[in-house]
């Protein structure tokens, strides 16, 4: 297919008009980004693929309701749909477990440049290995920028549980980074 150069508004208009090439362009433009986000939440290739496809189905179904609010608003809207689909998938499969119990967490000091020595792919792998509850809250808070109240509303948990899950996720990530440094895998 010849490369299309369209504004977001024109792309949306053509997709609503059932232009097959515009649908294909939109899919190709956002697929990789959505797949990466889905993997952050689901940590399973097949589940991530399913959620991406379900998200695009919703995007094309509800595109007529999209309200253009400037450059980037289409991508933000599509990412929101994907995040909601990922959460819906986790809930449907009963994969999210939350534990409010906080045990003593001995936070170890990391060398100042430890994170700088790591590749982004190393950090993403560590995030993917977190328990689902930790990973979901960590992604929503640290990556997507949601508040604990918004996370609590999305996941049907208390703000306290959201804060606890984030604290545990950070602690486990710090331990994993420290262990990787100690064993020379970074």
Image (cartoon, grey):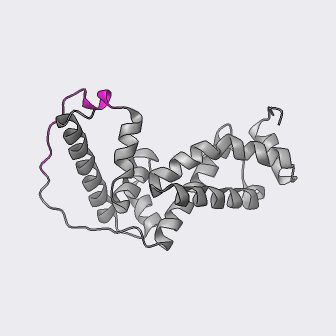
Taking depth in this image into account, of 53 and 152 the one nearest to the observer is 53
Judge left or right: residue 100 versus residue 65.
left
Instruction: Please tell me which residue is depicted at 24% across the width and 45% down the height of the picture.
Output: 176
Q: Is residue 115 magenta?
A: yes
Looking at the image, is 167 positioned above or below residue 71?
Answer: below
> Which quarter shows the C terminus?
top left
| Res 180 seen here | yes
Give residue 90's position: percent from left, percent from top.
47, 66
- Residue 95 occupies which quadrant of the picture? bottom left
Q: Is residue 124 magenta?
A: no
Taking depth in this image into account, of 17 and 56 the one nearest to the observer is 56
Give residue 145's position: percent from left, percent from top.
44, 47
Magenta-drawn stretch, dominant element (helix, strand or loop): loop
- Residue 99 occupies which quadrant of the picture? bottom left
Q: Where are the magenta residues, as a range?
A: 106-118
Give residue 110's position: percent from left, percent from top.
18, 35
Looking at the image, is 93 positioned above or below residue 166?
Answer: below
Judge left or right: residue 16 versus residue 53.
right
Instruction: Please tell me which residue is depicted at 11% across the width and 57% down the height of the picture.
Output: 104
Instruction: Please tell me which residue is depicted at 85% across the width and 49% down the height of the picture.
Output: 20
Judge left or right: residue 11 versus residue 27.
right
């Amino acid at each position: 297919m010849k490369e299309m150069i369209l504004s977001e508004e024109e792309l949306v208009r053509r997709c609503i008009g059932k232009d097959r090439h515009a649908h294909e362009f939109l899919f190709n433009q956002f697929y990789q980004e959505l797949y990466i986000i889905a993997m952050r939440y689901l940590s399973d290739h097949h589940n991530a693929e399913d959620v991406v496809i379900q998200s695009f189905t919703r995007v094309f179904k509800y595109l007529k309701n999209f309200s253009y609010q400037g450059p980037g608003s289409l991508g933000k809207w599509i990412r929101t749909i994907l995040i909601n689909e990922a959460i819906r998938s986790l809930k449907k499969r009963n994969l999210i477990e939350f534990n409010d119990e906080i045990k003593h967490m001995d936070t170890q000091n990391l060398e100042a440049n430890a994170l700088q020595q790591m590749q982004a792919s190393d950090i993403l792998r560590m995030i993917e290995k977190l328990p689902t509850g930790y990973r979901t809250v960590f992604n929503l808070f640290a990556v997507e920028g949601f508040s604990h109240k918004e996370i609590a509303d999305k996941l049907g948990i208390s703000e306290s549980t959201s804060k606890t899950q984030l604290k545990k996720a950070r602690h486990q990530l710090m331990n994993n980074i420290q262990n990787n440094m100690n064993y020379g895998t970074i």
